[in-house]
Image (cartoon, rainbow, N blue to C red):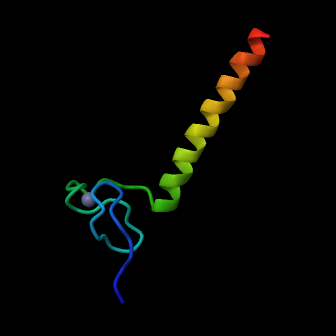
Amino acid sequence: MRSRERCLRCGGPVADGVAICHRCNPASLPSPSRTQYHATVFIVVLVTLVLAAGVLIARG
Ligand SMILES: [Zn+2]
């Protein structure tokens, strides 16, 4: 059965549970899993929205 995992950078096939393929990550740096990657992006967006709302509220 073929893996449906895709590299987050180039879209090429990667092993299960790996977010970045070896070509995009030649140093084999620790890369977050896809779930962690998406969670991180979500949190950054959420924090940005909260900070923006806080600025608007502080300004009255
Ligand atoms: Zn890649």
The residue positioned 42% from the left and 70% from the top of the image is: 17
Left/right placement of residue 59 relative to residue 40 reads right
Among the 4 quarters of the image, the one containing residue 26: bottom left
1 to 36, vertically: above or below = below
The residue positioned 71% from the left and 25% from the top of the image is: 53
Viewport quadrant of the N terminus: bottom left
7 to 40, vertically: above or below = below
Q: Quadrant of ligand 1?
A: bottom left
Viewport quadrant of the C terminus: top right
Among the 4 quarters of the image, the one containing residue 50: top right
Q: Nearer the viewer, residue 15 or 56?
A: 56
Left/right placement of residue 11 relative to residue 33 reads left
Q: How many marks?
A: 0
Left/right placement of residue 23 relative to residue 4 reads left
Q: Residue furthest right?
A: 60
Q: Residue 41: image x %, image y %? A: 52, 45
Q: Residue 4: image x %, image y %? A: 38, 76
40 to 6, vertically: above or below = above
Left/right placement of residue 24 relative to residue 49 reads left
Q: Nearer the viewer, residue 6 or 31?
A: 6
The residue positioned 34% from the left and 84% from the top of the image is: 2
Q: Residue 12: image x %, image y %? A: 27, 66
The residue positioned 19% from the left and 59% from the top of the image is: 23
Q: Residue furthest bottom?
A: 1
Q: Residue 55: image x %, image y %? A: 69, 17
